Image (cartoon, grey):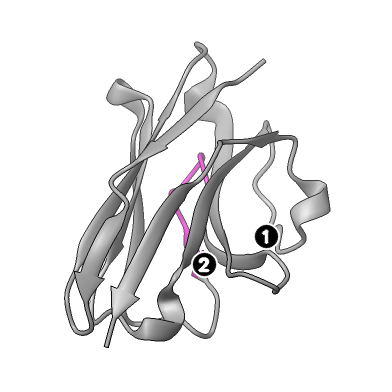
Amino acid sequence: QVQLVESGGGLVQAGGSLRLSCAASGRTFSTHTMGWFRQAPGKEREFVAQIYWSDRSTYYGDSVKGRFTISRDNAKNTVYLQMSSLKPEDTAVYYCAAQPNTDVLIRSRGDWNYWGQGTQVTVSS
């Protein structure tokens, strides 16, 4: 069982930056692939980024590529999402996700076993 707690959301002006954190419980964090999704009001939950546990390969959704960076610190059981050049359309609730013992690209929300409660990011124009 893995529990995920996101933090770092808030209100930021367009063009600004935020760093989200996701703290995970459990001793096997280092062998979980980790991801970030987001959901804006009235929209489907959207894949944002993923980082593998084995070689730390990273993958991004097209809308955030070049602006967001996912990273992980296994010693702290934490995954990060550094967001730069933020746009009003980045406004959403951001969710952390974990999937144990796998390193395949998982873009579908239904294929992730563990989720955090979400953190709100609001970008003003």
Residue range of the region highlighted in magenta in the rendering: 50-59
Q: Residue furthest right?
A: 110
Q: Could you say where residue 105 lies in the image, as x and y percent from the top left? A: 67, 60
Name which quarter of the figure residue 108 lies in: bottom right
Q: CA distance from mark 2 to mark 1?
A: 8 Å
Of 118 and 25, nearer the camera is 118
Of 51 and 48, nearer the camera is 48
Q: Which residue is painted at 56% across and 36% down in the image?
A: 116
Check if mark 2's residue and mark 1's residue have beta carbons within 8 Å: yes
Q: Is 117 included in the stretch rendered in magenta?
A: no
Which quarter of the figure is the N terminus placed in? Answer: top right
Q: Could you say where residue 33 lies in the image, as x and y percent from the top left? A: 58, 41
State how many labels appear.
Answer: 2
The kind of secondary structure element at disc 2 is: strand
Amino acid type at circle 1 is Leu
Q: Please, what is the dominant secondary structure of the magenta stretch?
A: loop
Task: From the viewer's perspective, tell me whether residue 45 is left or right of residue 28.
Answer: right
Name which quarter of the figure residue 84 lies in: bottom left
Q: Is residue 58 above or below residue 68?
A: above
Q: Could you say where residue 20 lies in the image, as x and y percent from the top left? A: 32, 50
Name which quarter of the figure residue 66 lies in: bottom left
Q: Is residue 122 above or below residue 74?
A: below
Disc 1 packing (10 Å; few <14; some 14–19; many ≥20): some
Amino acid type at circle 2 is Tyr
Q: Could you say where residue 90 lies in the image, as x and y percent from the top left? A: 42, 76
Q: Which residue is painted at 71% across and 64% down in the image?
A: 107
Q: Which residue is mark 1?
A: 105
The kind of secondary structure element at disc 1 is: loop
Task: From the viewer's perspective, tell me whether residue 85 is left or right of residue 59.
Answer: left
Q: Which label was assigned to residue 59?
A: 2
